[in-house]
Amino acid sequence: MKQYTVQPTRHEQTFSANDIIVSKTDLKGVITYANETFLHIAGYTEEEVLGKPHSLIRHPDMPHCVFDLMRSTIKQGEEIFAYVKNMCKNGDYYWVFAHVTPTFNDAKQICGYHSNRRAPERSHVKLFEEIYAELRSEERRHQDWRKGMEAASQLLMRKLSDRNMAYDEFVFSV
């Protein structure tokens, strides 16, 4: 489980609907590219992010089960859209609507991952804050973080099943 050296603040950074945050990683999630928008919003230099795990910007409010769903989806060669709360270098946070895709080589094998992130609809952020808080609460109820992640994943799947939707359908239905 990731240990945080930066303490999260309660200050949100926002960005323009015209801005697109872009990053690329290798198969292990190590950053191989970050555009200027990413660097500006997250507050890092290129030297500080290249070669580092993408979890560098992971906010502790994000449920493990959501990242697990994202990882398993892209490892299967599929794209995923998700609302994500990220953390800046100084502890501030910013919400994104992320589109994460696998990158394929000439042999059609996954060789990395690519993510484009836009500013989310503000009305949607509130809903995801509530859902993610419930999922994180479920994760924290368990001493073993893996069991917590599994329990929260089951909770998320029940919520989706109650709506008769897959995750991607839910993301676009809000």
Image: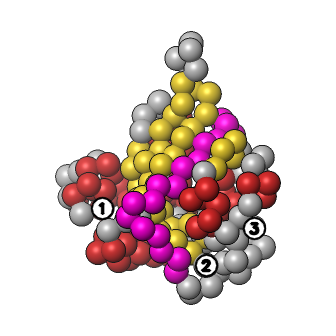
Q: Nearer the viewer, mark 1 or mark 2?
A: 2
Q: Residue at x 57, y 38 (%)?
A: 113
Q: Amino acid at mark 1?
A: Lys
Check disc 1 and report the residue beneath it. Answer: 159
Instruction: Using the image, tell me which numbered label, if any, was put on residue 92.
Output: 2
Residue 58 visible to the viewer: yes
Labels 2 and 3 touching (C-beta < 8 A): no
Q: Quadrant of the N terminus?
A: bottom right
Classify mark 2: helix, strand or loop: loop
Classify mark 1: helix, strand or loop: helix
Q: Which quarter of the figure has residue 131?
A: bottom left
Residue 143 visible to the viewer: no
Q: Quadrant of the C terminus?
A: bottom left
Q: Amino acid at mark 2?
A: Asp
Local crowd size for mark 2, using a 10 Å CA cut-off: few (<14), some (14–19), many (≥20):
many
Check disc 3 and report the residue beneath it. Answer: 3
Residue 117 in picture, x, y percent from top left: 46, 55
The residues colored magenta run 12-29
Q: Residue at x 47, y 45 (%)?
A: 100
Q: Is residue 19 magenta?
A: yes
